[in-house]
């Protein structure tokens, strides 16, 4: 069994918010955050290691170039997906997903 007394403070430190928010979050969402925390931390550590390796020149030039090209392509993909998400139905779809997860969605765009 998980010790929520140690997990909740880690979630709060990593993701932010106050403890009341974390105590009142739907369990499925809380579990998703807790499950992803070590994965996200590992990804961030790998990113830091890669950044230092490229910046210090401790990896071969062709590998460094491959990493930089991959990162550049990722930024282009993000930009394209952001442009696509500007359509009117994207907001509705995201709201439906959040509502299904137990998160209240309030649309204040018309106010």
Image (cartoon, rainbow, N blue to C red):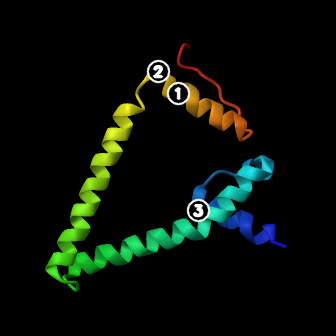
Q: Earlier in the sequence, mark 3 or mark 2?
A: 3
Judge from the rendering whether residue 29 lies leftward or rightward of residue 57; answer left or right: right
Whether label 3 touches label 1, CB < 8 Å: no
Q: Is residue 91 above or below residue 56?
A: above
Q: Earlier in the sequence, mark 3 or mark 1?
A: 3
Residue 3 in picture, x, y percent from top left: 81, 72
Whether label 2 touches label 1, CB < 8 Å: yes
- Secondary structure, mark 3, is helix
Residue 94 in picture, x, y percent from top left: 57, 33
Judge from the rendering whether residue 60 lies leftward or rightward of residue 102; answer left or right: left
Residue ranking furthest to the bottom: 58
Q: Quadrant of the N terminus?
A: bottom right
Query: Can the viewer see residue 69?
Result: yes
Badge 1 is on which residue? Answer: 91
Residue 75 in picture, x, y percent from top left: 30, 51
Q: Quadrant of the C terminus?
A: top right
Residue ranking furthest to the left: 61
Which label lies toward us, 3 or 1? Answer: 1
Q: Residue at x 75, y 51 (%)?
A: 28
Quarter of the view holding residue 10 = bottom right
Badge 3 is on which residue? Answer: 14
Q: Rounded to the nearest whole Å, what is the CA distance between mark 3 and mark 1?
A: 27 Å
Residue 105 in picture, x, y percent from top left: 66, 29
Badge 2 is on which residue? Answer: 88
Q: Residues within 10 Å of mark 3 (few under 14, many from 20)?
A: few
Q: Rounded to the nearest whole Å, what is the CA distance between mark 2 and mark 1?
A: 6 Å
User: How many numbered marks are there?
Assistant: 3
């Amino acid at each position: 069994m998980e010790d929520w007394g140690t997990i909740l403070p880690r979630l709060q430190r990593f993701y932010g918010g106050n403890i009341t928010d974390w105590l009142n979050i739907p369990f499925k969402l809380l579990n998703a955050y807790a499950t992803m925390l070590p994965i996200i931390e590992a990804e961030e550590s790998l990113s830091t290691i890669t950044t230092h390796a490229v910046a210090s020149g401790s990896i071969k030039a062709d590998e460094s170039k491959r990493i930089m090209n991959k990162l550049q392509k990722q930024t282009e993909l993000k930009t394209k997906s952001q442009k696509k998400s500007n359509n009117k139905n994207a907001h509705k779809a995201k709201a439906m997903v959040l509502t299904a997860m137990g998160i209240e969605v309030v649309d204040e765009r018309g106010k």
